[in-house]
Structures are given as C-alpha cells and as structure tokens.
Image (cartoon, coloured by chain):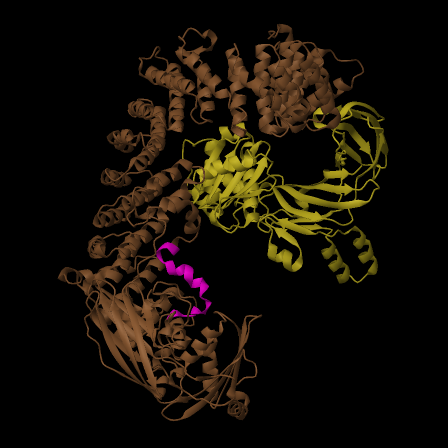
Chain colours: A yellow, B brown
C-alpha cells in the first residue's frame, strides 16, 4: 500500500508531502531527491528502490510525483493511481505546474485525503469528487441534508461515478477516437516495429441513468456475427475492415463481465468527459507517412542529406502540423538547407534540422536537401546517426478502428436512441515515428 | 605580472556564463551549450582567421563547458596556437586549457612540448613561469621525459630570475613525485643543496621542499644539507622580526621556511659535528625561549605561526631523543599548552606528549602532568582531544601510577564516547594486566570493566582474565568470590556471565564453604542468568554445570533436572542439545572417578603474548608505529605473567595471535584440527577396544577440557551406556606407548617424569612369573595427599595377566619416595599392556595420571641354545604362513652390531652365534613361558647397512605372538 505521496518541483523542493503510514519517515523525501531528481545520471526507471523503500514516480512537465512504499505493492496499481491523480488535478485546476500546485495546495491536500485512505486508493472519479470537494471555498449556508445524503449514497453506492437526477434539454454525446502511431523503419523502408496506442474519449450530456452500448469493428465480434449470419459475403467484407485489438482497458463504468462473455461494451456513462477505453494494435497499421532518407558523407568535413516524405492516405484528407527532425552530427559547423515546401531551419541548440509543413494532402510527396559542414575533430568516435523523427496529425485512425454504433437506452425517461445527438471524430497523431538513416 | 586590461574582459564569456547560470532546467542548459558549441564550431571553421582575443574567448568558453561536465572534442589546436601568442593573457588561457584538457594525443603533445620549450628558452620570466606551471600541472610521464633534463639547469643557472627558480624547484618536485625514475639529480645535487644559501627566501623555501623530498629517497646524497640548513635556521631564528621584511608573517620571521627546515632536519640523525650540533641546540633553545615571550600581536595568525615552529621544533627534539634538557623543556612547554584556550593546541600538545612519554629522558617530566591530562579526559568537549588524552594516559602509565590511571580511565569509561570505548577497554585491560601488583586488584579491575562497558569488552579481554586466573593459584579463590558477588547484581552483562560461569565452574569449590555461596546457591545464581544469554554463553554455562556436578555431587540431581528439561535436551540449537545430552549421560553413567578425570580443573595455559595487546595493535593499524613502539618500550615494564621479552617478539606473533583469538585461551583449539581422529572426544572415555585405541594425538589435558567444540556429532556417548566394562578410569598418556617401547629391551629405568612426579621401575622375570618394583618420587617440596595407584588390565588382558599389588601410603612428603611391588603372572600370551593409574592431590588440585606398565610378552622369554642344524630344522617346521611375521623397516637407531646385540639380549631370547650363513645376520631362539602353554619363538634379523634397512622375520608356534613381537621389535632398531 502507498505509504506516502510527495510532489516536487524541478529543483527537488517538496511542494506537497502527504504521509499515510508510519513506516515512511521524513528522510524518504530527501532520499528520492538525492537519488533520483539530483542523480548524476538520469534515472530512467520509474521505480526506484532506495534502502528498502520503493519510489514510484511520474513526471508532468517540471513536476515530479512520487509515491513511496515500504511494502511489496502492485506497481501497476500505484502508477494507475498516480495517473488518476494527475487527471484529477488537471480537472480541478488545469495544467500541472509549480505555480498551480502552490496556489492550490489546500485543495490538493483535501483531494489526497479523499482519494487515498491509509494508502489504499478510494474513489478517484472527478465528477464524484467535484460534488463534495469544491474550489469555491466554504459556502455561506451549508449543504442541505438532502444534498448531503445524496452525495453519500452516490459515493458509497454501486454507481459511484454518476449521480441521479441529471437533466439536459438536449441529449448530446461526443466521441473522439485518439490514436498515436509509433514506428521504427530501416533506411531501406522495412518496418522494424510499429504499433498504435489509442484511446476512446467520450463527453456525454445525457439525462437520467442511461444505459449505453458501444460497438466497433473488433475482429472477434465481427467474426462471431459473420458466423451467426450465414452469408459468406458479409463475412468477407467485414473481415477486411475489422481490426485485431491486442489489449484494451476500460473505464470503471464498463461492465467487464459482459465484455468477457459477449465482448459487448455496455455501461452507464459518467456525466461529462471521461476516457471510455484504451487499446493497442500492432497489425495492419496504416502508416500515414513514408520517410526516405539519403545521407552521403563527402570527405571528413562535409555531409549531404536528402530526405523525401510521401503521404500515404486518401487524397481528400489533409494531414496537419507536420514536422520532420533531421539530426546533425555533433561537430556541425554550418548548414545550408533547400526545401520545396514548408520551412526548414538548422537548430544548433537541438543538433537537428527542423522542417515544418503546415498541411499536406494524401498521396503527395515532398523533399528537402541539406549540406552540412563539419569541423574536423581529434575524436575518433564515429557519428552514431540517430534516426530521423517525424510529427504529424491526420484525421483518421491509423489502426483502422471504426465506430459502428453507440446506442443509448433510458427506460425511465422518455427519450430514445434517436433523440440523442452523437458526434464522432477520429484523430491520428504521431507517437515516436522514426526512420533510420 | 601584467594587469588584465579592461579590453580583455571577455564580455561574451561573461554573458554565456550568466546565461548558463540562469537556465531553469538541465535541458535548457544543454540547449544553450549546444547552441554555443555550434557557434564556436562555425567560428573555428570560418575562413577568416580569428584574432587572438576571440580565440582566447572561445577557448575559455570551451573550458567552461568542459568544467560543467560536457565532452569537448575540438579546440585543442586553437589552444596550442594561443601558446605562441606574445600576450600574457592569451598564453595563460592556452596553458590553462592544455593543463586541464590535455590527453596523450601524440601530434598535439609534440606541438605543446615545442611551445613549452620555446617559452623555457625565452628570456621572459613570466613566460618561463607559465611553462613551468603547465609542466607541473600536467605532471605526466611524457612531460617528465621531455623536460627532466631542462628544469634542473634552469634551477641552478646563475642568471635565472628568483621567481623562475622557485617555479622550477616546485615543478621538479612535482615531476619527481610523479615519475621518480625519470628525474635524476646526480650532477645537480650539490648545486641544489647550495640553493639553501640563496639570497632570496622564496627560492630557499621552494628548494627546501624539493630537497626534503629527495633526501627522503636517498639521505646519503643530500647529507651535506644538514649544516646548511642549521646555519640557515639559526640565521632566521636569531634575526629580528623586521629583518626579513616580506617574509615576516605577523612578527614571526619566515615561519614556513623554519618549519620546513626543521622538518628536513628530522630526516637525519643529530649532526655529528659538535659546532653544528651546538648551533642547532642553540636554535632549538631560542625557539623554546621565544615561546615563553609575551606575544607581539594578539592576532591568531601570530600565535599560529609561532606555535607551528614550536611544534616542529619539539618534533625534532623528540626525533633526536638525545638532549634530556631540551626534552624536559619541551615537555614543560607542552604542559602549558595542555590548559590553553585553543582546542587545537591542546590536541597537539597531547599528541606530542604521547611521543615524549616514550622517551626515557622525558617520561618522568610527562608524568607530572597526569592531573591535567586526567582533567582533560574528563572535561574536554572535543572527542578527538579526549581520545588523545586517553592515549597519553596510556603512554605515561607505569608501575607507580597505574592504579590511579586505571581507576580514572575506568571512571571515565562510564561517560566515554561510544567511538572510543572499545579502545579504552582494551587499554584498561592491558594496563591492569601489565602493572598489576596484586591479582585481586587485577580481577577487581577487569570485572569492573566488564560491568561498566560490557558491550565493548571484546572476547579477548575476558579470555585473558580467565587465563590469568587459571594460571595463578593465589587469585582463584578471590576471583570466585568476586564473580559470585558481581553476578548477584540484578542485571549482568553477558560477558560477566561468561566469566562467572567459567570461574565458578572451575573454582566454585573454593567458596563453597560459605553458606551464603553454597553450591546450590551458586548454581541457582548462574542458572538465573541462563535464559538471558546467547547460544555460545549458554553452551559455556552448560559446561560449567557439568563441572559443578564434579565439584559438588550434591548438586547432581538439580543439574540433571535442568539438563533433562526439554528446553535443553530438545533445544533447537544443535550445539546446546548435544552438550545437554552428553553431559546428562556423562553425569548419570560415569563414576565419580571418571567424572573427576574428565572434568578435571583446567591445566595452566601456556604463556604467550597477550591477545589483548595484539588486538589493540590491530585496531591501530600499521600506521600507528608509535603505539607499537610504546609497547616495545613497555615490555620491560615487567608483565604480570612472567616473560619480559614479550614486547620484543610481540610483533612477530601478533599476526598469528590475532588470527585465532580463541587459541590463546583455549590453547587446545588450535590442536583440535590437527587431530582428525578425535571424532567425538568423549567416546574415548569408554574405550571398547582398550587403551591401544586411544588416539595418540591429543595434548595432555586435552580431554579434561570440556569447552572444546565437538568436532562431530556422532558421539558414542549416547550408545555407550550399555557397556559394562569401563572400570578403566582414564586414558593412558599419549606418550606412554613410547615409554612402553623403551622398556621392551630393558627392565630398569625411569618410567615417567614430569614437574611433580618421577616414576622409576625395576623388574625381574622368571618363567611365567615376574615382579616389578615401582618407585614414586615426589619432586616438589609440597606433600602429595590422597596418593593412590591402581593397576588395571583393560579388555582381554584380565584373563591373560594376573597382577597383584598392595596399596601405597596415601601421603607422599616433598622430596620423598614410595615403593610399590607388583607381582605378575602370565596366564596366556597377550598383546596389550596393563595400565597404571595414579591419583593424588597437589596444592588443592587433583592430579590424575595414567601410564602403561612396561609389561610385554617378551619379558617371559626363556632363552634356548641350539645348533645351526637344529635351528633351521625348527625354522622349517614353523613354515605355515600365519606363523611367520615379517617386517622390513628403516633403521631408527644406530646399526652398530654391539648395540643390536645388547638389544636382542635384553629382549630375552638366546642369541645364536654362527648359525646364519651370513655373519651380518642375527638369529635368536627362545620359548615364551605362560601358565597355560609354552610358545617357541625363532627370530632372524637381517641388517642392510647400505640402505639403512632391516628385515625382521619371526616365526613362532602362535600367530598372534609372531605379529605382536614383530611389532614390538620393529620399534627398537
């Protein structure tokens, strides 16, 4: 169980320190600072064990969150909690920064008291928390008995994430499929590794206690239906479009028993924004861009680089925020760049040429060429040639995921599935999208 | 040195550094540095040549980046270019970069060396200095090789500037330290020594560092520096404070130079030249006098400088150790410092006094300060000073003040700092032992020590006290009484319980007369501590219990009850369980005689170096030479336990002594591994196969010691109880077999002898009957009481031999002799020897001795004369393979024919002349007479003088006789 939780700024000063158990002393705070934050070598492992005490940390911009324990806890649970904690703080006061944390430290302590009890995680649902932990300060008149009992019954009840009696004039629902595609490609264009990690984020404004059912082109479901329906054709056509999901996790509102037995995703949604599911796929990924590098070393003092990028999706779609980062050797003394499209610049502070293109349609290609002058050094080490990396945003899901339906049932109130306005959006972003050169 | 002009401020560098300092995060810093590096690269790459200023600036930036911890792989060339600049600042930065970032890159090193050479050859002193500094800063082997020849020349050249000479001397010193084999002084030696006469004080100061270092290497070559150093010193010491101008530091003339001179002199013995020596003594006296003068300034620097010289002078005085007058004066001076306000001074004074105390001249003088030192020990705030005070007390201790010092150290121990407690304990233990005048005081002290600082009392300390108590009869009673009293405290330290258990187990009987410490009370007292102890202590207590059973039979039921309880006999610890089981059985099966033998009092320990001393030395480590010197000096102080030369061989033995600290107390432990056959020790108490199976490996008293760790768990003791025939009281002495062999060929002689007792024997045999006279002589002047002897025939021997004797007088006066007659009848042939057990009390201690009686089968030989023909006829008759026994063995004694003849005659049979065709061979014939039968025996001994070998062949009508006789005889030649 979590023994304590500390939040540090980038200098290692403690902003928040909450100790839940007696086995964690004050010296644990310093141990983490000395051994992780101020460590001579960068500490890459998120779990550090110092003197029989385990520290689990996550870093958000310049802020370190560290959970401390002396027991043998489930590390995944601790990290899940830390992420949840970040979400909750973001929901309350926006970006996690030193200033925000300092300004809201009373609130944070209040939250920490609520979401962790003696080191055991409790309800961390933002919506529920917001009903009784408010930022407005203490209201002049206390909440009525009724309200209080309502909160109690919600928080302690079966559906802790949604309160009863919500009413909207317009029943609306937003669904975003957000994916990030990761790639490592050899200079010859061979895919060395590729995977997509995606999230389904929903924003729901629905009245009452609606029962929802979410459907997508999951291969297992489609195949099962294909078998159920006797026709061969439907099986073939759906087989092409279905995707194989490697693993997925759901929001706590999803009924896991139903998913396990029928693989259907049904749930009573929380009010407002939440992440319905997270998933990962590794097969049949649509790679939105292809990078073709060409590096030629001319003697010891000159390097010629040519990079071609090709967009590989429907011409009607537009990719945005494209950025190609071409690393330069450490002894670069001068760079000349020529590009047909967008803007390119040598950034000495990052040891890279950065090429930016605002938007680019599908099935197009573009090119950059650069001449890099080198300073001869007495260092015998050869340049390691780090890979060329790329950033972009495309309006489709590179994994091929499609939302097939999202049905809403509310038996008590008189609105039906058709009355709900639904919005679906697909965004594909680059994760670590690299090509070796 | 040219001042840095405003234009050289290098604004760009300042901006860059402030940028870096303002970076919020590491990432930002790296970005800024990358940007700067790219900028510098483009500048260095740029086509137009950079001017010296910007080159210097960028090299500076690179240096700064490097010092921040980033790799720099370019810019070396630019730095080397800076070396050839004519501007001081540019050259300086170039040298700086090189001394920080140089690596053994061959081409650059050549360029750098070239630059340095140019600068060394230039007439500009500042450039020369820069070059010399760079060489010293780099100090690599390459540098040493390149410039080792050049620098001495610069050093001794007449036209070199003083500042350059200083640098050259220090540079040479550095190179000499880094690679001494490259820097050869040879021809320069005398000229370097003469630098001591240089006009410029700075040069002298620099040169003296070099000379000190060199003269430590080969003192003979630099011997000539002593008179020069003395004259220099006397000039400084006698000069007025204003004479030396620049080199006067807060009214003290050239303090650093003085200190260095004094230190140089410490490399050499006192000067032999009377004039020089006189001058030096004068100097030292002046220094001591100056210390008495009122300070010329209140500033702390003034007194620091003055005291630095004074302490260095005192070190020199101690080093010479030949001027009693100076030593005493130094001691008095230090005595003043003992009460000085300044903590550092007190520390230094105590430290120096520690060395003074070891000098015979000043020992007494040091002793006068004992009160102050004790006071320092008690009241000093700083623990390191207290530690020094404790050291000094230890050093100044001798017979006259030992009691006082030990008492003070003991009382201080209660409040002492934890870090020095263990050392203090060791010191107290050593002093108490070394200067003990009466043993009761010693015992009191050590028991007090254990009481006060139990946790810090190491094993060695309590081992030692037990060793001493056991070796000294006169303290045993007192020790028993004292530990008994000490154990009565409600909370005892475990070490106290150990000592108590051991001493009461050994000497509890000495205080058992008092009803307040009756055996049961003693036992209950010990047992009340049992449950609070660790396993080793419990094991020791169990041994003490079994000894109690021996000492006080009335406690037997109680103790057996304790041993029988589940917590002992089923203890989860194997050692405890085994002890409980074995002791229980031992106590219930063995007769009192056996118990008394097995559980006899410990024999005195052999004298060797005190293990505590060894431990203290080890603690101090090899660096603390002075301490071991002290020990050596103390060796003659007279030790409690005899040998005065302990100090001398202490160093040699300390290693081995510390390796197995327990060996000192339990001397047997070291013997145990040598005896692989020991198996379980107690097995042998009930020998089934008779005494012949007794292991001949153990030392005397081996078995009586119960604390020996059982080597194996397969004790027969548990299986043995059914055995009926164990009236054999004890084992024969291990050497008794040898004694037995001695008497195979003779009948009269000294059978056994030790410090107390001599046993002589005389015997005559006829046919199958024999008579043996035993003479017991008391070698001491004290009466033996309860003197009893008993003869036993182990095993089958009972049916083979019939022995009769009368008891002897129970009292044997000092110097007196008693006689005992034994009548022996041989019933049938036998191979074992009967055992003689002697028991008596000597000075309160029960003595127990078991010997083999020299009764062997050959004693019953009847010689038979026969002719050569007869002999060979009979020889052939006894031709069955089992009737013959043959042995080929190497001669252990002389192969002289006469000697062999005498031996064969002494054996019993007739020696037949002219029987064997080979005259070298010996042939014997005889009949062994027993009551039941007569056994004919023929013998042939063939010596081979070349190979120093014998072949012995025996034929007899009984196979066992052949084998046994052959075995006996083989030991004789």
Task: State the image quarter where residue B581 is shown.
Answer: bottom left
Q: Decide whether residue B305 is among the magenta residues.
A: no
User: How many numbered discs, if any?
Assistant: 0
Against B426, residue B917 (above or below) is: below
Q: Is residue B51 left or right of residue B674?
A: right
Nearer to us in this view, B123 or B191: B191
Image coordinates of residue B934 in percent, x first then y, are 41, 92
- Seen as rendered, the residue at the extreme front is B914
Image coordinates of residue B240 in percent, x first then y, are 39, 8
Task: State the image quarter where residue B701 is shown.
Answer: bottom left
Image coordinates of residue B79 in percent, x first then y, are 70, 19
Task: State the image quarter where residue B250 is shown.
Answer: top left
At x 19%, y 67%, the residue is B813
At x 46%, y 44%, the residue is A3
The majority secondary structure of the magenta stretch comes to: helix
Against B398, residue B851 (above or below) is: below
Against B194, residue A258 (above or below) is: below
Q: Is residue A84 left or right of residue B452?
A: right
Against B828, residue A419 (above or below) is: above
Q: Quadrant of the N terminus of chain B?
A: top right
Image coordinates of residue B867 in percent, x first then y, are 50, 90
Q: Which residues are magenta?
A: B663-681
- Asked whether the viewer can see residue B561, the reply is no
- Asked whether the viewer can see residue A354, the reply is yes
Nearer to us in this view, B346 or A387: B346
């Amino acid at each position: 169980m979590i023994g304590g939780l500390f939040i540090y700024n980038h200098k290692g000063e403690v902003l928040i320190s909450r100790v839940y158990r007696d086995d964690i002393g004050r010296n644990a705070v310093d141990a983490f600072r000395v051994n992780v934050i101020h460590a001579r070598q960068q500490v890459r492992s998120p779990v550090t064990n110092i003197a029989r005490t385990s520290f689990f940390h996550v870093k958000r911009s310049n802020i370190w969150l560290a959970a401390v324990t002396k027991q043998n806890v489930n590390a995944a649970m601790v990290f899940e909690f830390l992420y949840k904690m970040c979400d909750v703080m973001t929901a309350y006061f926006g970006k996690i920064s030193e200033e925000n944390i300092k300004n809201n430290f009373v609130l944070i302590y209040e939250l920490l008291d609520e979401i962790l009890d003696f080191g055991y995680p409790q309800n961390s649902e933002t919506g529920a928390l917001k009903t009784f932990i408010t930022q407005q300060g203490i209201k002049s008149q206390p909440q009525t008995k009724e309200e209080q009992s309502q909160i109690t019954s919600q928080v302690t009840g079966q559906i802790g994430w949604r309160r009863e009696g919500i009413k909207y004039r317009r029943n609306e629902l937003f669904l975003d499929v957000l994916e990030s595609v990761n790639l490592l490609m050899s200079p010859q264009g061979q895919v060395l590794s590729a995977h997509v990690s995606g999230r389904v984020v929903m924003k729901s404004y629905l009245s009452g206690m609606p029962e929802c059912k979410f459907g997508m082109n999951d291969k297992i479901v489609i195949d099962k239906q294909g078998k159920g329906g006797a026709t061969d054709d439907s099986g073939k056509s759906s087989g092409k479009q279905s995707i194989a999901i490697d693993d997925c996790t759901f929001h706590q509102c999803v009924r896991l028993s139903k998913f396990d037995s029928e693989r259907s995703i049904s749930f009573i949604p929380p009010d407002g924004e939440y992440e319905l599911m997270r998933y990962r796929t590794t097969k049949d990924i649509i790679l939105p861009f292809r990078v073709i590098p060409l590096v030629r070393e001319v003697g010891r003092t000159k390097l010629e680089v040519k990079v071609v990028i090709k967009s590989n999706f429907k011409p009607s779609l537009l990719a945005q925020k494209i950025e190609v980062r071409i690393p330069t050797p450490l002894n670069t003394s001068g760079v000349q760049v020529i590009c047909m499209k967008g803007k390119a610049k040598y950034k000495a502070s990052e040891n890279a040429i950065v090429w930016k293109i605002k938007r680019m349609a599908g099935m197009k290609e573009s090119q950059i060429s650069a001449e890099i002058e080198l300073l001869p050094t007495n260092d015998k080490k050869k340049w390691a040639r780090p890979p060329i990396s790329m950033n972009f945003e495309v309006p489709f899901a590179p994994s091929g995921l499609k939302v097939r339906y999202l049905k809403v049932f509310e038996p008590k109130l008189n609105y039906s599935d058709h009355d709900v306005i639904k919005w679906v959006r697909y965004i594909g972003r680059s994760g670590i999208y690299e090509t070796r050169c | 040195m040219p001042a840095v002009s405003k234009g050289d401020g290098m604004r760009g560098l300042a901006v860059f550094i402030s940028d870096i300092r303002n970076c919020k995060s590491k990432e930002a810093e790296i970005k800024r540095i990358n940007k700067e590096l790219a900028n510098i690269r483009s500048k260095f790459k740029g086509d137009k040549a950079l001017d010296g200023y910007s080159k210097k600036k960028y090299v500076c930036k690179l240096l700064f980046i490097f010092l921040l911890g980033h790799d720099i792989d370019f810019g070396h060339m630019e730095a080397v270019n800076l070396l050839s600049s004519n501007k001081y600042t540019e050259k300086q930065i170039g040298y700086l970069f090189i001394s920080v970032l140089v690596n053994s890159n061959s081409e650059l090193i050549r360029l750098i060396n070239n630059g340095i050479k140019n600068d060394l050859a230039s007439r500009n002193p500042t450039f020369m200095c820069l070059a010399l500094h760079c060489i010293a800063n780099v100090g690599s082997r390459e540098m040493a090789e390149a410039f080792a020849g050049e620098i001495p020349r610069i050093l001794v050249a007449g036209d070199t500037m003083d500042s350059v000479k200083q640098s050259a001397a220090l540079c040479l010193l550095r190179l000499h330290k880094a690679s001494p084999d490259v820097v050869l002084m040879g021809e320069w030696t005398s000229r370097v020594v003469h630098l001591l006469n240089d006009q410029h004080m700075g040069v002298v100061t620099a040169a003296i560092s070099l000379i000190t270092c060199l003269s430590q290497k080969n003192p003979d070559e630099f011997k000539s520096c002593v008179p020069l150093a003395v004259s220099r010193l006397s000039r400084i010491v006698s000069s007025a404070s204003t004479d030396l101008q620049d080199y006067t530091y807060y009214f003290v003339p050239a303090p650093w130079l003085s200190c260095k001179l004094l230190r140089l002199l410490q490399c050499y013995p006192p000067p032999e030249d009377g004039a020089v020596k006189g001058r030096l003594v004068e100097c030292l006296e002046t220094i001591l006098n100056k210390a008495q003068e009122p300070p010329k300034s209140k500033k702390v620097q003034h007194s620091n400088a003055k005291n630095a010289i004074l302490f260095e002078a005192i070190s020199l005085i101690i080093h010479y150790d030949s001027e009693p007058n100076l030593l005493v004066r130094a001691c008095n001076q230090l005595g003043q410092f003992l009460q000085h306000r300044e903590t550092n001074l007190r520390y230094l004074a105590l430290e120096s006094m520690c060395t003074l105390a070891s000098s015979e001249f000043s020992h007494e003088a040091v002793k006068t300060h004992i009160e102050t030192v004790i006071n320092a020990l008690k009241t000093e705030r700083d623990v390191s000073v207290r530690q020094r005070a404790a050291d000094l007390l230890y050093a100044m201790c001798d017979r006259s003040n030992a009691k006082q010092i030990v008492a003070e150290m003991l009382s201080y121990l209660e409040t002492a700092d934890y870090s020095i407690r263990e050392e203090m304990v060791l010191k107290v233990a050593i002093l108490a032992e070394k200067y003990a005048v009466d043993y009761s005081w010693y015992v009191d002290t050590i028991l007090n020590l254990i009481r006060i600082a139990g946790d810090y009392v190491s094993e060695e300390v309590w081992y030692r006290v037990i060793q001493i108590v056991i070796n000294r009869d006169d303290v045993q009673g007192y020790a028993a009484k004292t530990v008994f009293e000490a154990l009565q405290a409600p909370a005892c330290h475990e070490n106290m319980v150990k000592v108590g258990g051991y001493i009461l187990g050994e000497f509890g009987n000495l205080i058992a007369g008092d009803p307040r410490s009756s055996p049961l009370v003693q036992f209950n007292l010990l047992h009340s501590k049992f449950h609070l102890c660790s396993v080793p202590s419990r094991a020791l207590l169990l041994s003490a219990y079994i000894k109690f059973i021996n000492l006080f039979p009335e406690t037997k039921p109680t103790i057996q009850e304790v041993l029988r309880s589940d917590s002992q006999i089923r203890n989860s610890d194997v050692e405890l369980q085994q002890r409980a089981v074995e002791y229980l059985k031992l106590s219930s099966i063995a007769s009192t005689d056996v118990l008394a033998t097995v559980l006899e009092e410990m024999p005195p320990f052999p004298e060797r170096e005190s293990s505590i001393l060894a431990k203290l030395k080890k603690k101090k480590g090899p660096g603390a030479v002075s301490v071991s010197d002290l020990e050596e000096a103390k060796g003659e102080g007279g030790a409690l336990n005899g040998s005065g030369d302990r100090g001398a061989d202490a160093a040699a033995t300390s290693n081995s002594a510390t390796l197995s600290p327990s060996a000192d107390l339990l001397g047997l432990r070291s013997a145990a591994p040598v005896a692989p056959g020991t198996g379980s020790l107690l097995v042998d108490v009930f020998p089934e196969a008779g005494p012949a199976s007794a292991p001949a490996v153990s030392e005397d008293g081996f078995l009586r010691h119960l604390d020996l760790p059982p080597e194996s768990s397969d004790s027969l003791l548990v299986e043995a109880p059914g055995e009926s025939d164990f009236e054999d009281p004890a084992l024969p002495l291990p050497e008794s077999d040898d004694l037995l062999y001695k008497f195979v060929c003779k009948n009269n002689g000294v059978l056994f002898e030790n410090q107390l007792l001599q046993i002589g024997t005389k015997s005559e045999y006829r046919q199958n009957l024999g008579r043996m006279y035993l003479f017991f002589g008391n070698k001491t002047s004290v009466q033996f009481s309860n003197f009893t002897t008993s003869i036993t025939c182990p095993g089958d021997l009972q049916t083979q031999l019939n022995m009769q004797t009368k008891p002897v007088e129970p009292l044997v006066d000092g110097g007196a002799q008693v006689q005992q007659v034994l009548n022996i009848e041989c019933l049938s042939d036998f191979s074992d020897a009967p055992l003689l057990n002697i028991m008596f009390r000597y000075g309160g201690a029960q003595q127990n001795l078991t010997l083999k009686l020299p009764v062997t089968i050959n004693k019953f030989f009847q010689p038979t004369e026969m002719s050569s023909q007869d002999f060979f006829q009979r020889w052939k008759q006894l031709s069955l393979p089992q009737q013959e026994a043959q042995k080929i063995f190497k001669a252990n004694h002389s192969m002289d024919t006469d000697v062999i003849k005498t031996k064969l005659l002494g054996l019993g049979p007739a020696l037949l002349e002219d029987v064997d065709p080979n005259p070298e061979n010996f042939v014997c014939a005889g009949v062994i007479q027993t009551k039941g039968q007569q056994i004919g025996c023929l013998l042939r001994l063939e010596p081979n003088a070349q190979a120093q070998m014998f072949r012995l062949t025996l034929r007899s009508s009984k196979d066992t006789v052949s084998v046994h006789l052959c075995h006996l005889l083989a030991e004789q030649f």
